Image (cartoon, helix red, strand yellow):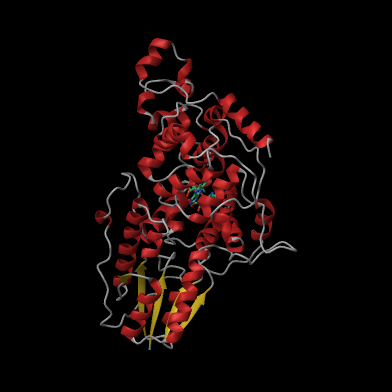
Amino acid sequence: TVAVVLFTSDLRLHDHPPLHAALRAADEVVPLFVLDPGIHAAGFDAPNRRAFLADCLRDLDASLRRRGGRLVVRAGPVAGEVCAVAAECGAAEVHMAAGVTAYAHRREERLRERLGDGGVALRVHDTVVTAVAPGAVTPSGSDHFAVFTPYFRRWDRERLRKPLPAPRAVRVPDGVRGRPVPERADVSGTSPGVPPGGEKAGRDRFSRWLGDGLSRYEDLHDDLAGDATSRLSPYLHFGALSPVELVHRARGHGGPGGDAFVRQLCWRDFHHQVLAARPEASAGDYRTRHDHWRGEEDAADDIAAWREGRTGYPVVDAAMRQLRHEGWMHNRARLLVASFLTKTLYVDWRIGARHFLDLLVDGDVVNNQLNWQWVAGTGTDTRPHRVLNPLVQAKRFDPEGAYVRRWVPELADVDGRAVHEPWRLPEDRRAGLGYPAPLIDLADGLARFKHARGRD
Ligand code: FAD
């Protein structure tokens, strides 16, 4: 017998329940990935993620080949491609993990219908995107938690399943057609610092980080220059790493660093359970706040300066340039540039979220849109006055100014924390830097925001 395993956001062999189930149920298995034009049409495609995806697929193919198999890659509408592969190999079943987003649900529905017409069963396994499935923990009287802390308290008590090992062997039937596995080199327009993708790179990074990063995490995770976070987010986004395994191993490691890291992983699950219950939360305001955000028409120059990292606020500019260079940004930096755009410049959060999605290797609709809304105060947690002053943030989280000097070469020769306020330098020194004056006075920005909010 033959079964197909459809890989989606789970590009790994370790801890892969659908693959495990298929290998138990059938003699031969077709590991399948479909390059879906729907992702492109929906605007969720970006060069940095495409490059990382290519690495993930090549790594998955190499791992399968070491086990006697291979990855079959196809391109086209998913339902049609899966049906065609099932027909080519005479499969009786298709296994996949449940998705969380509205897009994934529609894909599942289409697949069920189309496969059913051909007499092929679709076996949808529990989601592997999160550690705890959306909806598995709920408050009384609601289908999801709207605020993080109570969710975390319940989530932390959940018993997680044991992670599964990678299979030893995978036999793939002959005669299933596939296209060449994509290569990173085929993708143009990528940021130079996109890290290597794939399960092996992710596992290596995680093991190294458990050894030398976790114990410092609690103290240093907000330090911009220390760069002491795991940088595992792209691997989690593509499912090259299993969140269940990460939680188990971090808990096993113990200590305050382990607890702090597990708490961050819970944020992913938190946002996923909001979005699973409220699919509309990603597209617009979860609750309307009657905001009068500025858009491209009335804030084009401010938006361009923010995107390009030339607002005149060094920590904001450093972060925006890091994003462009690496396709990644530190969480503290994401918070402060999002606050700067929405509160200080009073620009619509969706414009910022779009720019992030165009560049982030870990960019996903769930974590990106919901974190942006958390900052903007339009999400489930609607505290509106979460305003981060970029100067206060810079002095606290980049006390020596090293992060700014790393990313803003114009300021590389300005010593110490003076780098955060170049406008205070003597006139002749300032003029020679070639660095812009502040785009806006912080107090004016805040006054505009408060005035606008006061109109509600
Ligand atoms: P670590 O500190 O090592 O944390 C470990 C893991 O926990 C991360 O890899 C991530 O998967 C998860 N995590 C940590 N913080 C959060 C959080 N606030 N929300 C959700 N998951 C979290 N994360 C994304 O994965 N994709 C996005 O598109 C994204 N957009 C964001 C936009 C804004 C405006 C903000 C404020 C945050 C966003 N985040 C996003 C969350 C967070 O900034 C990144 O997950 C984190 O910076 C990744 O770095 P790391 O892997 O070193 O994190």
Identified at 53% across, 33% down, the residue is 345
User: Along the horizontal axis of the image, is 136 left or right of 82?
Assistant: right
Question: Residue 309: which quarter of the image?
Answer: top left
Q: Is residue 37 visible?
A: yes
Residue at 29% of width from left, 71% of height from top? Answer: 65
Quadrant where the image shows the C terminus: top right
Q: State the image coordinates of residue 175 (x, y, percent, origin top left).
A: 25, 82
Horizontal relation, residue 150 to residue 332: left or right: right
Picture quarter containing residue 141? bottom right
Image coordinates for residue 421, horizontal then vertical, percent: 48, 21
- Residue 288 locus on image (x, y percent): 64, 49
Quadrant hosting residue 80: bottom left
| 39 or 226, nearer to the observer | 39
Which sits in the foreground, 169 or 183? 183
**181 on left or right of 19:** left
Horizontal arrangement in the rendering, residue 239 relative to residue 133 (left or right) = left
